[in-house]
C-alpha cells in the first residue's frame, strides 16, 4: 500500500480536484484506492459523490479512535473508497492536541487497512495544522499540484521545507514524489516559462503529464463526481487517467 499526501500550502491550486481525479484514474486502471479527506470543508467527500452531511462515521471518528477505516469508509461514485470529512473535523484539532500520539493517529488507522488498498490519497487542508501533520506522518510521499505562475514557486519552497522538517523529526519515509502541473494553458508564455523553470530546478521530480485548464473538470464537483467519470472524453479527464498510469509506473 502506497500512501500519498496531495499537498500545497497555497490555496486554490486544485488539490481536491487532483485528489479525486487521480483516485478515479487509478481505479480505472485497476488499482484499489482510498481517499482520505482531511479538510473540514469536505470537498473531496462531496466531489466523490458522498454526502458529507449524512456521514454516520467520518475521518474525525477514525482520528479519535472511536471507529476503524473499515467502519467509516464510504464507496464513491467512481469505484474508490472515501474516508469522509465534514465540519466536525474542525473540532478534532482542539481535541487532538491533548491526546497521545496525536500526529500518528492516521498512520496507525491506515496500517489496519493495509491489505485493502494499493493506493491511499490524502487530501490535505492548505494550512499546516495537526490534520496536515497527520497526513504527512502517515504518507510515503507528497504529490504537489501547482499552477505555473510566479507566486506558485514561492509557496513551493515553504512546502519543501515542511517536508524536510517532517522527514527529519517525525517521518523518515516522507519524500517529495513529484510536482504536477495543473490548470495549464500553453498559450500563456509565463506559464511555459515557469514550467521550464520547474523542469530545470526539480528535474525528474516534475511529472511528465500536464493537466490542462479544463471547464469539464471545474464543473464536475457540482454534479458530485470526479471529472474522470463526469466526462471521460474531456481533455482533463484523459490527462488524469494518463497521470494515474504515470503514477503507477513511478512508484510501482
Image (cartoon, rainbow, N blue to C red):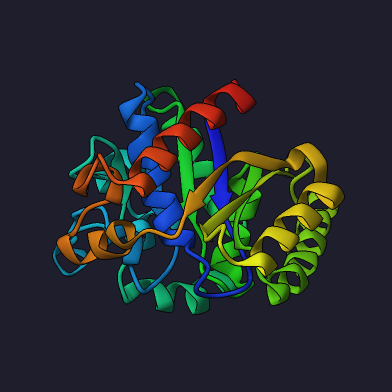
Residue 175 horizontal/vertical position (percent): 75, 43
Query: Which one is nearer the viewer's eye here, 6 or 64?
Result: 6
Residue 90 horizontal/vertical position (percent): 42, 77
Figure check: 170 above or below 2: below
Q: Is residue 95 left or right of residue 214?
A: right
Residue 92 horizontal/vertical position (percent): 44, 72
**What is the count of numbered marks?**
0
Say which quadrant the C terminus sits in: top right
* Residue at the (37%, 63%) spot, across then down: 60
Quadrant of the rendered structure where residue 133 is? bottom right
Residue 46 visible to an observer of this rendering: no
* Residue at the (60%, 61%) spot, across then down: 146
Figure check: 215 above or below 239: below
Residue 70 horizontal/vertical position (percent): 30, 38
Residue 220 visible to an observer of this rendering: yes
Figure check: 79 above or below 104: above
Quadrant of the rendered structure where residue 9 is? bottom right
Figure check: 151 above or below 157: below
* Residue at the (29%, 37%) spot, across then down: 80
Amino acid at each position: 500500500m502506497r500512501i500519498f499526501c496531495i499537498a500545497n500550502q497555497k490555496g486554490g491550486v486544485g488539490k481536491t480536484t487532483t485528489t479525486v481525479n487521480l483516485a478515479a484514474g487509478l481505479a480505472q486502471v485497476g488499482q484499489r484506492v482510498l481517499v482520505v479527506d482531511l479538510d473540514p470543508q469536505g470537498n473531496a467527500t462531496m466531489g466523490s459523490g458522498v454526502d458529507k452531511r449524512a456521514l454516520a462515521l467520518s475521518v474525525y471518528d477514525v482520528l479519535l479512535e472511536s471507529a476503524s477505516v473499515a467502519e467509516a469508509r464510504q464507496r464513491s461514485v467512481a469505484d474508490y473508497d472515501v474516508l469522509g470529512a465534514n465540519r466536525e473535523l474542525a473540532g478534532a484539532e482542539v481535541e487532538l492536541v491533548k491526546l497521545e500520539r496525536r500526529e500518528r493517529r492516521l498512520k496507525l488507522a491506515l496500517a489496519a487497512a493495509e491489505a485493502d488498498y494499493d493506493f491511499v490519497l490524502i487530501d490535505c487542508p492548505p494550512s499546516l495544522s495537526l490534520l496536515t501533520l497527520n497526513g504527512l506522518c502517515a504518507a510515503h510521499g507528497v504529490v504537489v499540484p501547482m499552477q505555473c505562475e510566479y507566486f506558485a514557486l514561492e509557496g513551493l519552497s515553504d512546502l519543501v521545507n515542511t517536508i524536510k522538517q517532517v522527514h527529519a523529526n517525525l517521518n523518515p519515509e516522507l519524500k517529495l514524489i513529484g510536482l504536477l502541473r495543473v490548470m495549464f494553458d500553453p498559450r500563456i508564455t509565463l506559464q511555459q516559462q515557469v514550467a521550464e523553470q520547474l523542469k530545470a530546478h526539480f528535474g525528474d521530480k516534475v511529472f511528465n503529464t500536464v493537466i490542462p485548464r479544463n471547464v469539464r473538470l471545474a464543473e464536475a464537483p457540482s454534479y458530485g463526481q470526479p471529472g474522470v467519470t463526469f466526462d471521460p472524453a474531456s481533455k482533463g479527464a484523459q490527462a488524469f487517467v494518463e497521470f494515474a498510469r504515470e503514477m503507477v509506473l513511478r512508484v510501482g
